[in-house]
Image (spheres, rainbow, N blue to C red):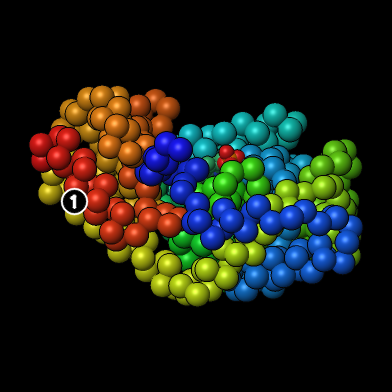
Amino acid sequence: MKKAVSLFIPGPVDVAPEVAAAMTRPMIGHRSPAFADLYREVTAGIAALMSTRNPVFLSTSSATGLWEAAARNLAPRKALCCVNGAFSERWFTTIQKCGFSADKLEVEWGRGIAPDRIRERLVTGAYDVLTLVHNETSTGVAEPLEAIGRMMVEEFPDVYFAVDAVSSMVGLPIRIDDWGIDILLASVQKAWALPPGFSICIVSDRVIRRSETVRNKGYYFDFVAWAASAQKGQTIITPSIPHMYGLQTQIERIQKEGIENRYERYRRLAERTRSWGRSRGLTLFSEEGYHSDTVTCFRNTRNWDLADLGDRLYAEGYQFSNGYGKLKGSAFRIPHMGEITDRSLAAYLDCIDSLTGS
Ligand SMILES: *Cc1c(COP(=O)(O)O)cnc(C)c1O
């Protein structure tokens, strides 16, 4: 078999062998008591890692489905969508495509969104939902979620606060209950480090109450139906049981590492990545004060041929991450999430050095 290429892209990321092995365990019936045990163990494990009392739901969809779920269950009168990159832009579009009204609070790609900017818009009283991408994977920008969340709790308790944590859940500290997060959603192929195709949604009780009043939500993403099934330790559809086995093992691994140690590992790897780049004459794409600790985006200030660098890294066994979308060629990204360690990151950066003569 060909040697696997190490993924240095911000999703999907490499999967630990124990997790991959767990996912090949024999199937069980999704209406069996064994399944209910698995369901309860996994959802309780996620709630414990995230220190939340809110219900945890599992979705056999990627996180994009959960963007849609957020729109359909909240049915915003008008949403305010923070936009500063490809994913936040797409969430805004998704809400509109679901038929709801939304405005953008837009700042340039690479910039962060300060709480004051959000306050300015919310004080108008025009909005009942705020969407925020915690960690813009396209630009390496992490928002000040704590400051925004505390503002939401103190100043805008009537506005539902929906947060995309696709590349930050179990990667950056998030305090759902203290920061008033009504919906926190994530795919599992980024900081969680499982194969793609599954996602996690943590939803406040008041979202479920709101959803009870909403019609025409469709079938697949109805939180009220999810909550009723969860009472029985079930999902409304046949879920990806392999992902649940994988999550069960990954939760144990994260508990063993310690969630705080995991956050610390990413902080350290991010710091190492930033200082590596700075010392090679690369500038950060993300604004000072908003650098992400799970993915770094550099401007291509050295004018490297990034397509060629990607090809040569591939020949060395690495999948490289060029800039996202319109940033292709002018920026590139280095992820430090999932299973990446001091050692694997150092080897990768050394390889870039040797190929670029840095
Ligand atoms: C990758 C990503 C998404 C999309 O996730 P899918 O699993 O492809 O649906 C959404 N938001 C952010 C921040 C992402 O990084």
Q: Quadrant of the C terminus?
A: top left
In the rendered image, residue 221, in percent from the top left (x then y), is placed at 79, 45
Q: Quadrant of ligand 1?
A: top right
Q: Amino acid at mark 1?
A: Trp
Residue 68, above or below 125: above
Decide if residue 116 is on the left or right side of residue 160: left
In the rendered image, residue 42, in percent from the top left (x then y), is placed at 69, 65
Q: Residue at the far front: name it.
A: 1
Give the SS element for disc 1: helix
In the rendered image, residue 131, in percent from the top left (x then y), is placed at 59, 47
Q: Quadrant of the N terminus?
A: top left
**Among the 4 quarters of the image, the one containing residue 92:** top right
**Among the 4 quarters of the image, the one containing residue 329:** top left
Which residue is tagged 1? 276
User: Residue visible at 31% across and 54% down?
Assistant: 344
User: Residue visible at 30% across and 27% down?
Assistant: 311
User: Residue visible at 42% across and 41% down?
Assistant: 4
Looking at the picture, tell me which residue is in the foreground, 149 or 94: 94
In the rendered image, residue 214, in percent from the top left (x then y), is placed at 86, 46
Decide if residue 39 is on the left or right side of residue 18: right
